[in-house]
Amino acid sequence: MSLCLLIYNLGQRELRNCLKRVKKGINNQVGKVTLRPTLRWIFQCFQGIHYVILNGVKRIVNLTEERRFILSLLPASCQRYYL
């Protein structure tokens, strides 16, 4: 359990440091811009993204500009699943 918390905190810290570096924030649950989002909130933001195959065409749907911005802050190993 403690290993899970360590990984969670490291991910959250990395994301917050990236937001500080680019000097931009993201919207929190109530719509206010924040530089300190929780990783749980980021995971919830990504729940709406879906991989769809329709008539043999593969697409990723609901990938908004804000979600693309968050992805740009994450490592390439995370980006490959969405881009």
Image (cartoon, rainbow, N blue to C red):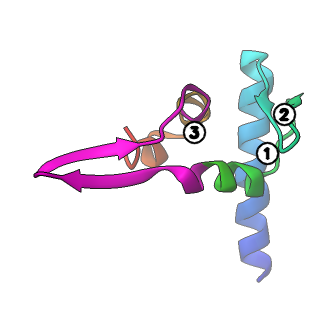
Kindly report the distance in space between the C-alpha atoms of the residues bearing marks 3 and 2.
22 Å
Which element carries disc 3, helix, strand or loop? loop
Q: Earlier in the sequence, mark 3 or mark 2?
A: 2
Q: Earlier in the sequence, mark 3 or mark 1?
A: 1
The magenta segment is: 46-67
Residue depth check, mark 3 versus mark 2: number of the one nearer the observer:
2
Residue matched to label 1: 13
Residue matched to label 2: 31
Residue 62 at x, y percent in the picture: 47, 41
Kindly report the distance in space between the C-alpha atoms of the residues bearing marks 2 and 1.
21 Å
Q: Residue at x 77, y 66 (%)?
A: 6
Q: Residue at x 70, y 52 (%)?
A: 11
Quadrant of the drawing holding the C terminus: top left
Marks 3,1: beta carbons within 8 A = no
Amino acid type of the residue tagged 1 in the rendering: Arg
Which element carries disc 2, helix, strand or loop? loop
